[in-house]
Image (tube, rainbow, N blue to C red):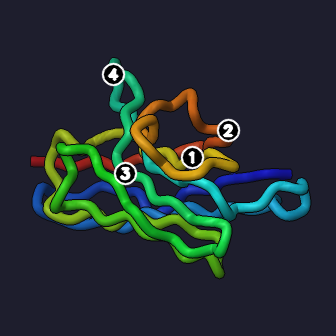
């Protein structure tokens, strides 16, 4: 059974940091793999649409590269991927109250890159249940 499980959310004051993790499991057993895939972080605040935060691609050689970011988090957030652990990370620094949302990880594949559609939720096959991030002023 394919599964994505997020963790690391919490409540912090503005200016603080959090590190989110997303562990992927079941992909090999299902016949799918995590290579040639785009993994992304999305977030959704109450009353707002789900929006792409960051994404990173892993090629057929299992090398992660080419991270992309939404302008609102560029320079503050860093997305990374440890393919040996099947884990996606999001290091969030200089957090702002407007970063408050439920954060989800998602995977799309097989694809040749994250590409210009990386922030489109409909392009992703699987989703985690989310982890809440709350930033107070």
Sort mark 3 into few (<14), some (14-19) or many (20+) by Cα contacts within 10 Å.
Answer: many
Label 3 belongs to which residue?
54
Which residue does the image show at 55% across and 76% down from the upper left?
A: 82
- Precedes in sequence: disc 2 or disc 4: 4
Query: Do the residues bearing badges 2 and 1 touch, measured as CB atoms within 8 Å?
Result: yes
- Precedes in sequence: disc 3 or disc 2: 3
- Precedes in sequence: disc 2 or disc 1: 1
Identify the element where label 4 is drawn.
loop
Label 1 belongs to which residue?
106
User: Residue 48 has which mark?
Assistant: 4
Q: Position of residue 76 (x, y in %)?
A: 18, 61
Q: Give the alpha-carbon distance from disc 2 to disc 1, as whole Å.
A: 7 Å
Identify the element where label 3 is drawn.
strand
Identify the element where label 1 is drawn.
strand
Q: Position of residue 77 (x, y in %)?
A: 26, 61
Quarter residue 42 falls in: top left
Report whether 60 appears left or right of 48.
Answer: right
Label 2 belongs to which residue?
125
Q: Give the alpha-carbon distance from disc 1 to disc 4, as whole Å.
A: 18 Å
Query: Do the residues bearing badges 3 and 2 touch, measured as CB atoms within 8 Å?
Result: no
Q: Position of residue 25 (x, y in %)?
A: 75, 62
Identify the element where label 2 is drawn.
loop
């Amino acid at each position: 059974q394919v599964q994505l499980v997020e963790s690391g959310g919490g409540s912090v004051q503005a200016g603080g940091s959090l590190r989110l993790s997303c562990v992927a499991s079941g992909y090999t057993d299902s016949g799918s793999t995590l290579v040639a895939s785009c993994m992304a972080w999305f977030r959704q605040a109450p009353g707002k649409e789900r929006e792409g935060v960051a994404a990173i691609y892993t090629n057929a050689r299992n090398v992660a590269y080419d991270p992309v970011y939404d302008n609102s988090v560029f320079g503050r957030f860093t997305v990374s991927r440890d393919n040996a652990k099947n884990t996606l990370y999001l290091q969030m620094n200089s957090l702002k109250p407007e970063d408050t949302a439920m954060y989800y990880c998602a995977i799309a594949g097989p694809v040749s890159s994250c590409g210009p559609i990386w922030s489109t939720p409909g392009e992703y096959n699987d989703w985690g249940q989310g982890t809440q991030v709350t930033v107070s002023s």
